[in-house]
Amino acid sequence: MATTMTFLTAQKELAAQLGLDYTQTDTATLLKRWLNLAYQDIVGWKNWSWVEGIDTVKTVIDSTETTLSVTASIALLTPTTVTFSSTIATSQTNRYIQFEGSEDWYKITAHTAATATATIGTAYCGTVALVAGDFTIRTVYYSLASTTEKVLNCRRAASGSEYLPIISVNDIDKFDPFTDTTGDPDCIAFFGQDSTGYWQFTPYPYPDTAILLEFRVFKKATELSGDSDYAIFPDKFNSVWLDRAKAFGYEFLNDDRQGDAFRRSVGMLERFKCQDNVGVTKINVIEAIDNGSVSNNQFVKLPDDYGR
């Protein structure tokens, strides 16, 4: 559960402890920055149980629902406009298109839903105009949620589905460099970030049916900005948050209390780190001989005279 302390409340508390006026614009900017720096520090301290989450992505099958026309590439003409024979209901932006008679895939950089024209990022290479030609539009890369920092694993979101191995795109290139395979995905490959900074991946083979992929992830700390924003950590981290932010504030103010605030926050984070074991049951495998007797644990069978 996220903290119940709003970003504005944290600013007021931090200002009070530092002896600053949070209503001053320049001061408020500094307070927000120190709190966000502290927030990032806390979330990045370890893979906390409270940053675990699930990101579900629905795959999209290839589209071949109409025909299209594209001008030939001749002389100084470098055509990037594609005209479909009818409108396409959903936006095809960031998908890839392959034209009849060509093995090349072009990225669609712009298409508005319910329109019949699209823009490709690289000029069409064909020297003969394509009129009422067939095509295939494919989603090559899928993006995860903006809040995803790291991926633990992936599986089909279906009963009894096994986990899909996560490999690099380079590995796919090694064993199938010219892949155009479709079918039921048997692995997932990550390939950097998209234009908005979200992690993107490609299933292999490309799905020939719409399926749900479930990713277990670690969430990132999205920078707080609005007064009513909340940090993703539990309430017990509020004091650590303020101490960590105070350390930045004291450093700015050249106050020698900076070290104490920093060390205090580190101590509390280490303590919380040891306590962050949700659902773990402690099992004593071997009892100390000081107890006067030796008993066998139900999971590990020891000799009757063990330790005597």
Image (spheres, helix red, strand yellow):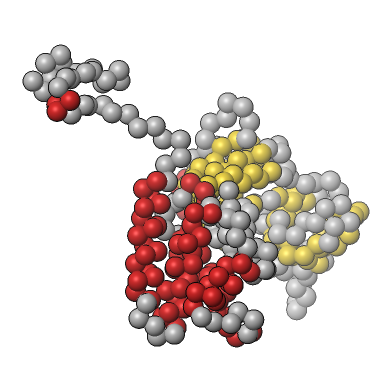
- Residue 22 spot, x, y in % from top left: 60, 79
Say whether residue 134 is left or right of residue 18: right
Tell me the quarter of the picture where residue 12 sits: bottom right
- Count the numbered circles shown: 0
Depth order, front residue of 53/165: 53
Q: Is residue 145 above or below residue 162?
A: below
- Give the residue drawn at x 70%, y 59%: 94
Q: Is residue 290 above or below residue 201?
A: above
Depth order, front residue of 245/86: 245
- Give the residue drawn at x 35%, y 71%: 260
- Give the residue drawn at x 70%, y 56%: 96
Depth order, front residue of 36/287: 287
Look at the image and tell me whether residue 8 can be seen: yes
- Residue 193 spot, x, y in % from top left: 57, 61
Q: Residue furthest left?
A: 308
Look at the image and tell me whether residue 127 can be seen: no
- Give the residue drawn at x 86%, y 49%: 66
Say whether residue 184 is left or right of residue 257: right
Q: Residue furthest right?
A: 86
Q: Residue furthest top?
A: 304
Tell me the quarter of the picture where residue 213 sits: top right
- Residue 20 spot, x, y in % from top left: 54, 82
Q: Quadrant of the C terminus?
A: top left
Say whether residue 296 is left or right of residue 234: left
- Residue 159 spot, x, y in % from top left: 62, 27
Depth order, front residue of 255/89: 255
Q: Is residue 135 above or below residue 158?
A: below
